[in-house]
Image (spheres, helix red, strand yellow):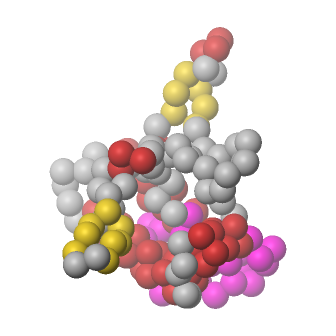
Amino acid sequence: MLRNGDGHLKNFGLLYDEGKVWLAPVYDVVTTTIYKYERSLGVFVTDRTMALKLRRGEKHKPYPALDELLSFGRDVCGVASPSEVVARIAQAMDEVLANARADDRIAPETLRAATEEWLASIETYAGGGSTGSSPSSRPRRRNRKVLAR
């Protein structure tokens, strides 16, 4: 959801305690889609692929659609209610964006680019983007109007 194309294996950690194992909190998270790179002949593009595939045998690693993400959470990771996790992540993203606007250490252009990417991601994943409904027919999140300014 953060559009971090740099999520390779060294950026994930496991915690162990008394025979239990779980994922460590996220770290080294970068919204890589705000950075364009130059291809041949001076054409600049945005990489919209992940560093890792979700499933064995996939040829490409694009960011997953909502149904793919929920299926991965449920079937591979054993998350009982992946849609609730997606909603919590979207709410946290809203809160981080609100805090970032008050932080003068963040360059305005970086904040603008990250805000655009994150709001699009929140709309895709928490707003029902893969259901085929139009943006106007989906319920808007309470904080969206404030964040979109």
What residue sits 31% from the left and 77% below the top? Answer: 20
Task: Please tell me which residue lies in front, 129 or 148.
Answer: 129
Percent of width and height locating residue 62? 66, 49
Q: Nearer the viewer, residue 71 or 18?
A: 18
Which image quadrant for residue 135? bottom right
Q: Hey, which residue is sitting farthest top in the picture?
A: 41
User: How many labels sit on residues?
Assistant: 0
On the rendered structure, is 87 left or right of 48?
left
Magenta region? 121-149
The x, y position of residue 110, in whole percent, is: 36, 46
Residue at 57 percent across and 73 percent down: it is 73
Which image quarter is the C terminus in? bottom left
Q: Is residue 144 above or below residue 15?
A: below
Left-right relation of 13 to 144: left
Q: Is residue 130 magenta?
A: yes
Vertical side of 122 occupied by 4: above or below: above
Which residue is most to the right?
Answer: 132
Residue drawn at (67%, 51%), measured in percent from left and top? 56
- Quick check: can you spot residue 83? yes
- Percent of width and height locating residue 52: 55, 47
The verdict on residue 138 being magenta is yes
The residue positioned 37% from the left and 75% from the top of the image is: 92
Choose top left, top right, bottom left or bottom right for residue 66: bottom right
